[in-house]
Amino acid sequence: MTIDLFITCYNDTLFPDTGKAVVAVLERLGHRVAFRREQSCCGQMHYNTGYQSEAFPLLRNFVRTFADAEVICAPSSSCVAMIRDHFPKMAAASGDEKLVERVEEIVPRVFEFSEMLVDRLGVTDLGAYYPHTVTLHPSCHGLRSLGLGNKPRQLLERVRGLRLIELPEAEQCCGFGGTFAIKNADVSAAMLADKMRCVLNTGAEVCTATDNSCLMHIKGALSRMRTGVKCAHLAEILAASA
């Protein structure tokens, strides 16, 4: 199968190793990964901040770029949630019936990384080896918008050498929320402090998630506190081998 990688602008700019890890995992499973250079931002930041007209050309670009893709994989719950939850509403609001049809046709082919593995490809054991204690932060978009449930956990439980430690109050937001962390810095910092307490109480060496946006927020605090706890995207753990 050919799987198109929608790397998302956030990962492409700040966390390129995540994209490389996704490619490594999918190729290990025998699939071909395609990368379309015309891809750009999904428009989530614009849309959530009230700049919906600026987000609209990004929707059109996504639909045009991936029009003939068999399946599309993105290592970002929040970006997949933007496509799944808001692209249909944006298309409907445009009054362009052809665009509505194109969005309806493409949305079911877009998968978050753990969804792609568990639901679309039907695998949980990637042959990974990661000899560390790990705790999992379920990001809000993955938990509430996509309903990922225990898919990331299923994948981590099959990693050799890895000991998964339950994160207290795991369902609570880390406080990032994109521009929320900028507009509501004090509230965001308080939420982050609660998340740090929970992460540190696990005694885990590594905190993982399906979103690098959350991990950047968490990693910043862990680094400033000089805790020694690292952060790694789920794909990076699954790509690791002996």
Image (cartoon, rainbow, N blue to C red):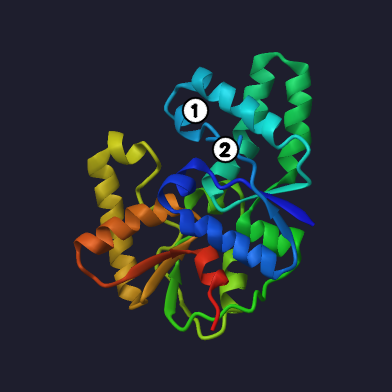
* Residue 33 locus on image (x, y percent): 69, 55
Measure how far apart labels 1 and 2 are at the Cα level: 9 Å
Identity of the residue drawn at 64% across and 79% down? 127
Label 1 element class? helix
- Disc 1 marks which amino acid? Tyr
Q: Nearer the viewer, residue 220 or 23?
A: 23
Quadrant in the rendering for residue 203: bottom left
Q: Residue lying furthest left in this view?
A: 225
Please rate how many residues cluster around mark 1, counting C-alpha atoms within 10 Å: few if below 14, some from 14 to 19, many from 20: some
Q: Is residue 137 left or right of residue 3?
A: left
Vertical placement of residue 139 versus 155, above or below: above
Can residue 13 be seen by looking at this rendering? yes
- N-terminal of the pair, mark 1 or mark 2, is 1
Q: Is residue 215 left or right of residue 56?
A: left
Which numbered disc covers residue 47?
Answer: 1
* Residue 17 locus on image (x, y percent): 47, 59
> Number of callouts in the render?
2
Vertical placement of residue 204 versus 67, above or below: below
Name the image quarter holding the N terminus: bottom right
Quadrant in the rendering for residue 126: bottom right
Please rate how many residues cluster around mark 2, counting C-alpha atoms within 10 Å: few if below 14, some from 14 to 19, many from 20: many
- Whether label 1 touches label 2, CB < 8 Å: yes
Vertical placement of residue 40 versus 10, above or below: above
Name the image quarter holding the C terminus: bottom right
Q: Residue lying furthest front in this view?
A: 37
Q: Is residue 119 left or right of residue 126?
A: right
* Residue 75 locus on image (x, y percent): 56, 53
Identity of the residue drawn at 62% across and 57% down? 113
- Disc 2 marks which amino acid? Met
- The residue under label 2 is 82
